[in-house]
Image (cartoon, rainbow, N blue to C red):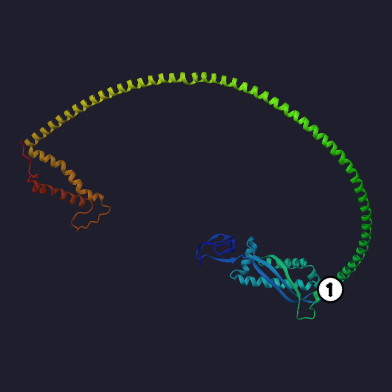
Amino acid sequence: MVWGFVTCGPNEALVVSGACTPRNMPHTVVGGRAFVLPCFQQAQRISLNVMTLNVESPRVYTAQGVPLSVTGIAQVKVQGQHEEMLLAACEQFLGKTEQEIHTIALETLEGHQRAIMGSMSVEEIYKDRKKFNHNVFEVASTDLVTMGITVLSYTLKDIHDDERCYAKGYLDALGMARTAEVKRDARIGEAEAKKESSMKEALAEEERMAAKYINDTQMAKAKRDFELKKATYDTEVQTKRAEAELASELQEAKTRQKIKEEQMQIKVVERAQEVQLQNQEILRREKELQGTVKQPAEAEKFRLEKIAEATRIRLVLEAEAEAEAIRVKGEAEAAAIEAKAKAEASIMAQKAEAWKEFKEAAMMDLYLQTLPKIAAEVAAPLSQAKKITMISSSKSEVGAAKLTGEVMDIVSRVPEMVHKMTGIDVAKPVRTV
């Protein structure tokens, strides 16, 4: 049994049934998830995939009593968008495989297809396939909807005579009369068209030849007149062209001479203007250099000399001040070091005198100052431990008292160790002077 969160894909529906469902009805989920209570609910799946049905109806008698064989293609699926249809499909098919659902839908469609074939004539089925498709689709949809199945499409794939019955060739015979009429009309129309075409072609050829003769005559006459007029025109044109060419060459020579004279005058004037402009440019450049180079250079030289002199004086003063500061600082540090050395020497002398006079008391004071440090070093490993396990008899102490006793026992052995190492008994009472 499956419980907890159960998921399903978009091509299937999850059906949760049992206790604690809304309205005490099975709860359906399409392409999602649902929580299934253990021991109280169960989850089942139903496929929403499209099923392709090859609906075959062999040897079915039509309304005229003619047997036909029809093959249709239908696309059906369990409807998951409408809750009522999905619940109906769950009621009919839950627990069945997709092949079993396929078989039920196929048999239903085959029955409706045979019924529609029996209510229509061969001509209606053969000529009006759209009507046949619509009838089968409508009747099958009405019946399958109650099962929760939707017919997506239905198409008549093939229709043929039964090869084993006397009506074989019935469908072929339906079109034979019409085919014969069409062929007859085609032959008659073709003959009439050929006759009319031949007559019109002959008349057109006669008119074409007559028009061609008239046209050739007119063209020859027009060509003669054109050649005569063209010769006259060519003579006149050539004469005028020669005169025009001579006059043009003479006028062109005169024009070139004038142009050369004018160009020479222009060059003389341009040369004089260029000389004048060059002289003016030389004067302008001299003044420009005087104002922009020489005077600024002298001013900049004077400014740099003053800046260098001021910098030199500043550096000398700074060096003298730094040397004086270093000298004063050195004298102060030397005095401080001398005073500190004298103070430390005095303190050391006083300590030596005190140790000489109060040897035992001084040793005791040093020992008492060092004893807390020894205790701290002894207890340091214990303070770093994360976990301590203590084993004790019923008569010994436990807990913090036990730890404190251990530390004190170690510290109490320090005087003995000092006595062994130095010969000084720090536990001996101090003598008073």
Mark 1 Cα shell of 10 Å, populated few (<14), some (14-19), many (≥20):
few
Instruction: Inspect this view and state whether residue 121 appears.
Output: no
- Residue 228 on image: x %, y %: 91, 45
Q: Quadrant of the C terminus?
A: top left
Q: Give the residue drawn at x 13%, y 32%.
A: 345
Q: Quadrant of residue 268?
A: top right
Q: How many marks?
A: 1
In the figure, 380 relative to 296: above or below?
A: below
Q: Give the residue drawn at x 36%, y 22%.
A: 308
Q: Quadrant of residue 152?
A: bottom right
- Callout 1: SS: helix
* Residue matched to label 1: 176
Q: In this rendering, would 357 be left or right of 282?
A: left
- Residue 143 on image: x %, y %: 70, 68
Looking at this view, is 70 or 431 the one in front? 70
Instruction: Inspect this view and state whether residue 384 appears.
Output: yes
